[in-house]
Amino acid sequence: MAAVLRKCKRNGVKLVQQTCSVRFLKKRLPIVGWLPKYNLEKFQGDLIAGLTVGLTVIPQGLAYAAVAELPLQYGLYSAFMGCFIYCLFGTSKDVTLGPTAIISLMTAEYAKGEPTLAIALCLCAGLVQFTMGVLQLGFLVNFMAFPVISGYMSAAAVIIGCGQLKLIFGLKNVRREFIWNIYDTFRKIPETNHWDLTLGIISFVILLIMKWLKDRNWDKNRDPFTPLTTRQRVGRKAIWLIGTGRNALIVIVTTIFAGVLFSNNIRPFTMTKDVPPGFPDVGPPSFSYEHNNRTVEGEEFFSHLGPGIAVLPLIAILETIAYGKAFASRNKYRIDATQELLALGIANIVSSFFGSYPMSCSCSRTAINSTSGVRTPLGGIFAGLLVILALAFIMPYFQYIPSAVLGAVIIASVINMFEYQVIPKQWRIHKPDLLVWIVCFLCVLFLGIQFGILVGVGLGLIIELYGLAKPGTKVDTIDCCPKIAVVRFDKGLSFPASDFIVTTIHDAGLDEPPYKPVILDFTHVSHLDFSVIRSLALSVEEYGTNNTPLYFACVNRDLEGKLKKASIKNLQCFPTVQLATEAILGASIEDGDVHQPILMTELSSDHLDISSDTGEVLQNHISPTDKDNHETEV
Amino acid sequence: MAAVLRKCKRNGVKLVQQTCSVRFLKKRLPIVGWLPKYNLEKFQGDLIAGLTVGLTVIPQGLAYAAVAELPLQYGLYSAFMGCFIYCLFGTSKDVTLGPTAIISLMTAEYAKGEPTLAIALCLCAGLVQFTMGVLQLGFLVNFMAFPVISGYMSAAAVIIGCGQLKLIFGLKNVRREFIWNIYDTFRKIPETNHWDLTLGIISFVILLIMKWLKDRNWDKNRDPFTPLTTRQRVGRKAIWLIGTGRNALIVIVTTIFAGVLFSNNIRPFTMTKDVPPGFPDVGPPSFSYEHNNRTVEGEEFFSHLGPGIAVLPLIAILETIAYGKAFASRNKYRIDATQELLALGIANIVSSFFGSYPMSCSCSRTAINSTSGVRTPLGGIFAGLLVILALAFIMPYFQYIPSAVLGAVIIASVINMFEYQVIPKQWRIHKPDLLVWIVCFLCVLFLGIQFGILVGVGLGLIIELYGLAKPGTKVDTIDCCPKIAVVRFDKGLSFPASDFIVTTIHDAGLDEPPYKPVILDFTHVSHLDFSVIRSLALSVEEYGTNNTPLYFACVNRDLEGKLKKASIKNLQCFPTVQLATEAILGASIEDGDVHQPILMTELSSDHLDISSDTGEVLQNHISPTDKDNHETEV
């Protein structure tokens, strides 16, 4: 008793020591690790990157709020707290949390335009992510294969892009669901506001040109050993700056233009709705809202969020870890996936107290952050401060932003999410993956994101499991002796294949008389489970009762141990196919002909002579008096 | 248009021809194949086997009806139609359909003692099985691993065995659920009927002795070359006969004994309830029943059957196909799994019109059938006729069967279903399988069969998928050059492992400076999917940006093609690890030291020289101008 108490105490002390150690603190609050080493040079890098990201997140936040079907200010509410929290808990200098296209689309699907629901969803998502971090369940995202991810991202791009056509055309009362959206948009084309359309198309083309200029490799035809002239350097810097700030630039220019027209009482463009200035209400998220003069709360409230609580956090985790890893690898540092999960969870939980809808890692802003020369997660602080300044001072001017320009910004930024180029690649490399991609794409498009992802993951696993049930096998004959069959397995064998194995081995030798001796080539087999070993025992017994040799060749030491422990009667392992062949031929020469059935018992005594010749044969003959052997009974 | 019509017509004609061909008829109605070859010798074998099976199924049917918690006559109602139908559609001469222990237990769980529910369940199970046969979904049972099957069978044996203790002790009002059953039985031990207990124990011991006598190998110490004397032969035949008919024998003897006592007004034993004589009502199953003066029908009716409709048919399929295959292999013929499914489905559908509860293949009766020398499925006809005779003439005497004897019969027949011997075996051979076994066993025991099976199958798949997510890898160094790391994968790589692969490859060479060149040994890799190829491309890029070589060795021709098609920049494949090592060393000697980072571009030009030296190197350098290559972007 005293010993148990002592042990408990020791473990308790150990746990406390562990959680209070500096190492643990640095792991779970990474800022403690890097802040003491902070210096002016890092500050400079972080400041420039932070402001650039801030300049990007403001127009993007407004646009993504439109995708999420929330009032525009919610895009900004979601854009600052994540940066602050990530600065404390994040392990990547590049990752930038905030509103993203996919998560905004999912928010639209679950919150249906009701901010209270969106904020509650943010809290729930954060709690799920934090719990998953604590339980180290992040590995679950591995079961989302690339075709599933690419398929749903492409479908989301199509849904988001098509959803913005209504803004470009200046249409009203267009339904949200993809099919109805397309239908309504085309039906209402006659109602097009031509000013909106003109402005939208011009903005879109300008955005594409700016992006092209920025991405262009200006040094392609340049002699790499001539240094750049000052003019060239300044020119490139200017192009990069304009290209990076293109969203902010186009929004500012068109807003000023529309504002000036408005003050002269000319109102050609559809404008954004009134945006209330100032900060969001700070406080715990509410779990009830008014709808048609009725309070929605409790079970009904959560039934709206439904499967979103499970699916949305997973997608956010996937984005954050994937982009985090990609940029860590590019910039040669490592991230801690569990800590990223915790950081994302805490960011969502805290942000929900500031009126934020669910956040994730934005790929475009992370890339901007990285190329702007960010040095530590502190860069996020500056981006967040810029958003707060915008909320404080320029919110009133947001009402002059023409909707068509926001539409153009969104379409221009999701256009690259449609990964058409993986279609021919998957076709060439692995066709089942293309099937998964297409199914996932179509399901997301027509049945909704969560259903599409579920179907995609399910289909991927089914294809995988089907592969396990039908492992690759090849039945060959040996050149020197076509009357012996060799069955080659090309990977580890596991239980779904048990039945297939028995059938394959049966067909190789016992399909029809005269029966053929069979050698099982285990070169590529590195894994056997209990069900498979049982099936092999059944096959050995079947060949035994038919007096036909069934030998194992090239079994690795580990598996040989397992087979031995299974006490299979008359089990014979040989180090090579050649030796197994010689054993069969040696026995059959004495019997006159390989066609003749060879008595298993004779073989096992003959075989001792052969083994003394070759000196290498492993003899695994288990005593048949082993009474416990019920292995081959069903 | 005309061409399309012609094609439709051609396909239609082909389909009609196919389904009407003699071959198809023989496949789907196997009796057409074997009946014309029937002769007197086969008749003799079938008659003896059929009568022996009939003699076994009568007491077993009564006992299993008790397990199913139905009136005893339902055991016999379930015992004849299956034999007739299987004779028409079955492909195995040995398989005997009828009531079985496991299916009876499941029936008790879903039908809760209500015959109408049990009969409806029989129809539903038959329809599910038939549909699965038509859709060729029989392969689904492969996903039930051996530990799951063995675990639930062992748990079912414990549940059934413990459930009969109440009969042996002569207790009343014992609840059905396993835990309550044990609790009530122990609590009520003071109420034991000592006559029941005495009779039960004596019957049980006699049954065990008879089984032991039958299974004993009488010829162990006999000289195999001396023929048996007539006395020995007759003695052995008698022992076999008594052993095989032991259930019938003990039931008949004790029933006569109890009947004689009863007619003298001595009633020491608890007897079976009144059994109505004659045949069941023939007609379509009813979908409503009276309960507490209320009609249960429609949705409520089916809600009772619930998941039973999915789980029970699967277990029945599993039993039928497993035993069918086992006896086919033992007796050297083959069964058609799809046809077996169809036969089982039709048997259940038709039987439900004759008051049967769900049926499956009985292992014990199939074994008796086989050892009694059955020659064709016609044997079943004789067994079925014997059951019908029993229903017609001896039913009134069934009321004198002492319950304790039925209890003893059941316990004696399920005692071998508890597979204690696989526990140490699984421990020695494959520990995760033991975990699945134990979890499945405990869940079936305490949470119910369907839940236990679901948990078992789920756990098996999770372990399998976890294995896919963490494939076996070994990071070695080369003897001659410890500064080069070799990563060996031990099986095919698929998407759940993508992330693990990137991390493993990173850690092998880029964990900390000085970076190590890495060779990936693909000897055992026979499978790559798109997600994995993408991860490999990421790793190649990562090593590229770090100027450290990452070479592929021993890639098989098929996979090399796939990698090539993926247009991975700077991909280098070598036929052996040796050649890859030489390539790295050759390049580093020119650079002075292997520690020095080696420029990938330099390497790929150097490498051409090396390849011309060794003459065998495969050069897979893909032009870096391939513009479509977005492979490494997330």
Image (spheres, coloured by chain):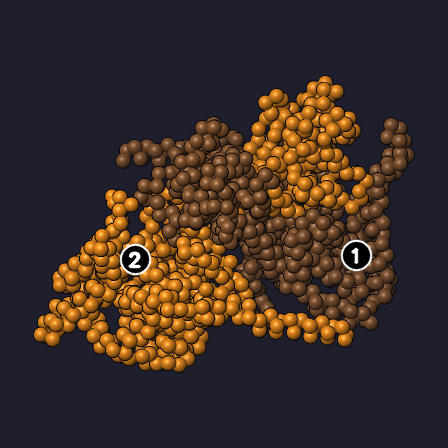
Chain colours: A brown, B orange
Which dot, 2 or 1, sits closer to the camera? 2
Residue type of the residue flagged with mark 1: Ala
Q: Judge left or right: residue A488 versus residue A531.
A: right
Q: CA distance from mark 2 to mark 1?
A: 73 Å
Q: Please state, as top left, top right, bottom left or bottom right, where the C terminus of chain B lies in the image.
A: top right
Residue A115 seen by the camera: no
Kind of element beneath mark 1: helix
Q: Chain of mark 2?
A: B
Q: Position of residue B70 (x, y in %)?
A: 30, 71
Tell me which amino acid carries mark 2: Val
- Dot 1 crowding, Cα within 10 Å, few <14, some 14–19, many 20+: many
> Residue A32: x, y in percent?
58, 33
User: Do marks 2 and 1 both belong to one polypeptide chain?
Assistant: no
Q: Residue at x 59, y 26 (%)?
A: B477
Q: Residue at x 14, y 60 (%)?
A: B198
Q: Which residue is mark 2?
A: B414
Q: Chain of mark 1?
A: A
Mark 2, secondary structure of its residue: helix
